[in-house]
Amino acid sequence: MERVDCVVIGAGVVGLAVARTLALAGREVIVLEREGAIGTGISSRNSEVIHAGMYYPTDSLKARLCVAGNQMLRDYAASHGVPFKMVGKLIVATTAQEAADLEGILAKGRANKVTGLRGISGAEATAMEPALSCVSALLSPDTGIIDTHAYMLALQGEAEANGAMVAFRAPVVGGHPHDNGMELTIGDAEGTRLVAKIVVIAAGLAACNVARAMGLANVPTPYLCKGNYFSLAGKMPFQRLVYPVPVSAGLGVHYTVDLAGRGRFGPDVEWVEREDYRVDPTRAESFYAAIRRYWPALADGALEPVFAGIRPKIQAPNEPARDFVVAGPKDHGSPGVIALYGIESPGLTSSLALADTVKGLVG
């Protein structure tokens, strides 16, 4: 039976970041990916935003890793030729109650040591973005956008240049402790088995199911929270990203732009039972009302379905949001295994900081 030092399960943005970091540290790394290419799941179905970290509870993993990861990601992109742009973001209030909510976000951002974040008046916001309608706003200059696929390719290339290997069509379907390691069963045609000293579960939507298949204890219950996106036909209304005051399970239907200058709105919140990325065109009806709160000039018929993503939640609908979970042996009872659960937004921004956290646990 083949023996390896480290196995990373999942070749999305977090799995590749972990593989790269461990390979740079001199570990032998194999990445097992169930699909035929890197980043085909939630890593390729998101807003591609470099978040600043003002939304998350102070001292939470999301807050600490997002704030640290923001600078790490920007530095990495700049040094590795990954396209990105710090376009900035406005979080806008359209009512007096929302303006009060903004004050809470600002206070949280300052407590989290978010750089550059400041409150501005509605007049200042509309001077920056004339199409905007709001009573006040927060300006986050250290929010940006990145080419996620180019970033994943850079991570993969650097990992492989340092000895890592990515195996595709290699779903992990089971595992159990074996001889100071974890024996993994890979569901390919031969039913391959290998023993790894270290296993990192970075499987996105499948993380909880993979952990259960490996016999880990204290695995959270996974929930699927779909987010639909609609593209905008015609002239783009804003230069910056524009976000409303957040809602319970997401950050609200916001405006983002990609590096080619194409604008889109989303994601909304749709709790689903299975992985399905089709966009129901009728969901645009609720988008118009949400968007017109801060952009009244949105024309009828301007929105077109474009794509959907799914957030890997570890709390049920109407339950309080949960933090990232980085579970080590003391949490689940399996030596050498590190499991990452609930790595939704800001997982992209936090990816390099998450990888350093895993490296610290691996030793």
Image: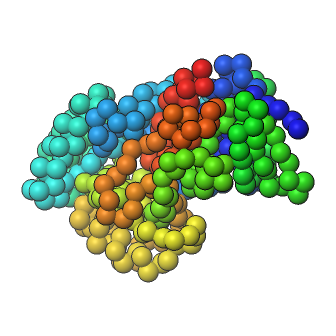
Query: Which image quarter holds the C terminus?
Result: top right
> Observer-nearest residue: 300 or 246?
246
> Observer-nearest residue: 229 or 227?
227
Q: Position of residue 210 (x, y in %)?
A: 64, 52
Residue, x 51% and y 71% (percent of image)? 273
- Colour convention: rainbow
> Observer-nearest residue: 17 or 106?
17
Q: Position of residue 75 (x, y in %)?
A: 51, 25
Number of marks in picture: 0
**Residue 105 shows up from this direction:** yes
Judge left or right: residue 123 versus residue 36.
Answer: left
**Residue 42 shows up from this direction:** no
Q: Position of residue 121 (x, y in %)?
A: 14, 44
In this rendering, the answer to whether 310 lies above or below 67 is: below
Residue, x 44% and y 47% (percent of image)? 345
In this rendering, the answer to whether 84 lies above or below 188 is: above
Judge left or right: residue 113 versus residue 95.
Answer: right
Residue, x 45% and y 56% (percent of image)? 313
* Residue extending farthest bottom: 282
Question: Which image quarter: residue 187?
Answer: bottom right
Residue, x 48% and y 70% (percent of image)? 272
Query: Which image quarter holds the N terminus?
Result: top right
Q: Position of residue 230 (x, y in %)?
A: 46, 66
In this rendering, the answer to whether 253 lies above or below 129 is: below
